[in-house]
Amino acid sequence: MNRFEGQTALITGAGSGIGAATARRLAAEGAHVLVTDLDEAAARKVAAGLPRATAHRLDITDRASIDRLIAGLPALHVLVNNAFVPFVEDPDENWRRQLDGTLLGAVHCSGAALPRLSDTAGAIVTIGSVNAEASFGDHAYSAAKAALGSFTRTLAAEAAPKGVRVNQIHPGTVATPSWAGREQALAALAARAYPLGRVGTPDDIAAAVAFLASADAAWITGTTLRVDGGLMSVNTHFREILDGH
């Protein structure tokens, strides 16, 4: 498939994990991909392996740098708000980082991109989390991801008359570099928490991004798509207790 032939896609946090997989998927389908990340070396490494890609250092908390990057593009068709903000131990600092990065980073990027996307009838896809829907830990991260859901819906209403679609994905547990050293925990989650018997891969999420960003989703906007292996549909512990009695 070449659903993105001749299109330009900007992906934040694309130096690893879900962002890197999304860059590979969209490039494989014909897109010129802007691989952006705070870690420029990681972005360059990903871009070097793609047929049509450029690497850019991007701090999503710096609106001026976002504006400069997007203003310099000949055109923009797809924005993927993916950048991941690592947790820190200090609660106050964690709240600040999650609100500035996870939430306002997506707000800044979307605001800068919307006028350009209006020219191309483009699409925004934001990576949320099942943490927005249930308690899986980290108050600040969960609250920021929940706020992204409201932002997605309100921005979708604003953007629709401009021909721009805005959607969100809620991944479950995905085996990304942030889980390095916790492979036993991933195996336990796969066996006990996920009805499909495994945790997700970055490619699972990239496939969903490609769908929502493409013309195949031309009549979908303001929607949150769970890509979670059935996690939110089945209470596995409840079932285990019930089946055991």
Image: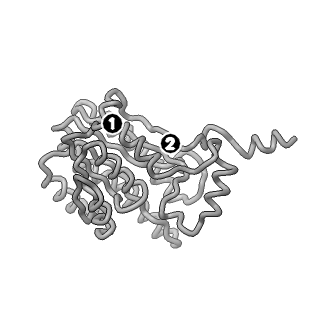
Question: Which residue lies under the disc numbered 2?
Answer: 227
**Which element type, helix, strand or loop, lies under badge 2?**
strand
The C terminus sits in image quarter: top right
Question: Which residue lies under the disc numbered 1?
Answer: 156
Mark 2–mark 1 distance (CA, rounded to whole Å): 20 Å
Disc assigned to residue 145? none
Can you name the residue that lies furthest to the bottom here? Answer: 90
The N terminus sits in image quarter: top left
Residue 176 in the image: above or below residue 235: below
Q: Amino acid at mark 1?
A: Ala
Residue at (40, 57) in percent of width and height = 102
Q: Amino acid at mark 2?
A: Val
Residue at (30, 70) in percent of width and height = 41
Which is in the foreground here, disc 2 or disc 1?
2
Let me know if residue 108 appears in the view: yes
- Total labels drawn: 2
Which numbered disc, 2 or 1, marks the residue that appears first in the sequence?
A: 1
Q: Position of residue 35 (x, y in %)?
A: 28, 57
Can you name the residue that lies furthest to the right here? Answer: 245
Q: Toward the viewer: 147 or 186?
A: 186
Let me know if residue 147 appears in the view: no
